[in-house]
Image (cartoon, rainbow, N blue to C red):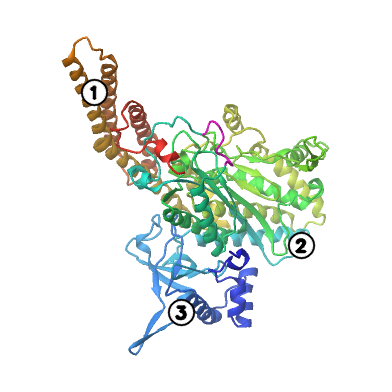
Amino acid sequence: MNLPEMFGENVFNDSVQKDTLPSEVYKALRATIESGKQLDVNIAGAVASAMKKWAISKGATHYTHWFQPLTGLAAEKHDSFIEPEGDKVIMRLTGKSLIIGESDASSFPSGGSRATYMARGYTAWDPTSPAFVKEGTLYIPTVFVSYTGETLDKKAPLLRSMTALDKQAKRILKLFGIECKKVSTTVGPEQEYFLIDEEEYLKRKDLMLTGRTLFGAPVTRGQELEDHYFGTIKPKIGEFMRDLDKELWSYGVLSKTKHNEVAPAQHEMAPVFSTSNVAVDGNMLTMELMKKVAHKHGLACLLHEKPFRGINGSGKHNNWSMSTDSGLNLLNTGDSPEENTLFKLVLAAVVKAVDEYQGVMRASIASAGNDHRLGADEAPPAIMSVYLGDQLGALVDSIVKGENYKSVKAEEGGIGVPESPIFPKDATDRNRTSPFAFTGNKFEFRMLGSQANVSDANICLNTIVADAFSDFADELEGKKDIEKAANAVIARELKKHYRIIFNLDGYGPEWEVEAARRGLLNNKNTADAVPVLYQDKNIDVFVRQGVYTRAEAIARADIRLENYTKIINIEALTMIEMAKRDIIPAVSDFVAELCRNVTSKRAVSERVPCNAEIKLIDKLSQLNDNASAAVEKLESDLKSVDRREVLSASQSMAHLIVPDMEAVRAIVDEMETLTSADYWPYPTYFDLLYSVK
């Protein structure tokens, strides 16, 4: 395999564009991609023709406008290139077909921002994200809007947020005499996932219908030996990883790192960062390909945040930064951050944004799956905070307290053995418990769930930081002494928002108490986290930066709560079905077998001991009755939930149905530990986590 040659071979990328497009068309398209200039629609025909010829040479017969509706998934409708010409056909892709398509918008979530009967929706080409050929189809990345102009997807607001940050960041740079064509946000979304045997997966209704195990007694060996993390990769998993890399590389996805994660059967892939919208498209493609490649290897890929109770769940760390087209990273501290006024101003803007909109950031990653993971000693807590580390922490402390800054520099380190190489001791550590940590020229937003569309988090980050930049630029533009004025703003804002900075252990129980004292939010579930999105302040920031209209902002909050309510409803119904149809009858059958054993023993002699069987019969019979009663309560409470109003319905799901489900599970999981494996109707955690060799 010649990796440099095969990388991006299925992508209509810059080199292909340069080779296939007329020179003037190529320059016009690159100006749109690189500098944010408005697309010249007159070049669409030439681009479409070249794209079609290239796609056909790769075996494509169809094209699709690939978009990301508010389901959070990717969507596609395939059209063939054929057009009739007499009694024959020709292969054609017109400029109009490239730029715009049509889909039935009424079948996708809109959050009430449009009437259901208004069916027409449009997909519009995103030229900044490259097209690609997959499985005989040309995929054209697009945005998705309704007939009346409302955005119905996650891509359009992401592009708007990138535009907002570009505009406001250039105002900040101009204050320091720095001119550039474009400031882009970049993202590198790490992806955690589980791989289990597909045959075992297909025996679990809960995994198939909800993505997680609704029942399951703990396995006797979990992750307590800490031997799976970075451990030797099993042969079958290694084959999957190699095939996945080849697939991703062929689509231009910069898959860089692969390894075993903490939990048994858990793994991770980390890409090199790229421009936000390209990174989002790449991650959507990554999740799709993970499932498809797993199937080829007889595996099932689980992307749920918490597929197994009692061991680590999966997240998606969002490495976020800002850079100019000339390569200046706005989050690069430089050799002496205390003297780098531009960096300190950017840092102050980020701290201000996170503090003022901590609730929005928490809501941006809220989901039913992620609720199981946040704060579970495996992921950041639900409390938003910023970790800066020793070097920047000391710098901020000196500014806030008005003290002299004592520089913290990187040092040389070693292990005291002459043959050992000298390695650099960084000026700061990394904090795995922090939701939003500075990790050297970038921030790592660690709260995202593994199956999330990363657009939501990055729309939020881009928008709130753009708004902070706007506030700073409004105040500083026109000042004669920018250094002096900027440092005054830096000191004021860091003092004002100092409460959001926390450089210690986010898992410690004392942090919740301290966070409450500071006035920080601690919304532990989606139903409690999302309502902040209805507050005027949190709507206005998106409207002000041109990312959402008021109706679009409210619609997205509605959809997030609707989705949460629907997921909990599906999980509850699945749990009821599994318990009533399979588990309770299976336990009853096992108890009956025990009773027959007792009868058989006593038929031989009344003196034959049966205490073990009788105690187990009593225990399981009582548990089975308790399980039946708990299921009846769950079923009754579920029917009582009025799902017509999203706020009250989500509250009922979070505070009534979820506890009911926990009660059912506790009983059933105990019964699993007492019931013969011959009678238990589903694969156990051992079967699921340790069957792949």
Residue 382 vs 101, above or below: the answer is above
- How far is disc 3 from disc 1 in space, using C-alphas? 70 Å
Assign a secondary structure to mark 1. helix
Prevailing secondary structure class for the magenta stretch in the rendered image: loop
Q: Tag 1: residue type?
A: Leu
Q: Residue at x 80, y 45 (%)?
A: 338
Instruction: Judge by depth and name the residue closer to the eye, 75 or 415.
Output: 415
Q: Could you tell me residue 186's position as x and y percent?
A: 63, 57
Assign a secondary structure to mark 3. loop
Residue sitting farthest toward the top: 607
Say if the magenta span includes residue 230: yes
Residues drawn in magenta: 223-231
Residue 404 vs 127, above or below: the answer is above
Crowding around mark 3 (Cα neighbors within 10 Å: few <14, some 14 to 19, many 20+) is many
Q: Decide which of tag 3 and tag 2 comes sooner along the chain.
A: 3
- How far is disc 1 from disc 2 in space, using C-alphas? 81 Å
Q: Nearer the viewer, mark 3 or mark 2?
A: 3
The numbered mark at residue 178 is 2
Q: Is residue 538 left or right of residue 180?
A: left
The answer to whether residue 602 shows anywhere in this view is yes
Q: Residue at x 56, y 34 (%)?
A: 226
Can you identify the residue that label 3 sits on?
93
Residue sitting farthest toward the front: 604
Residue 412 vs 515, above or below: the answer is below
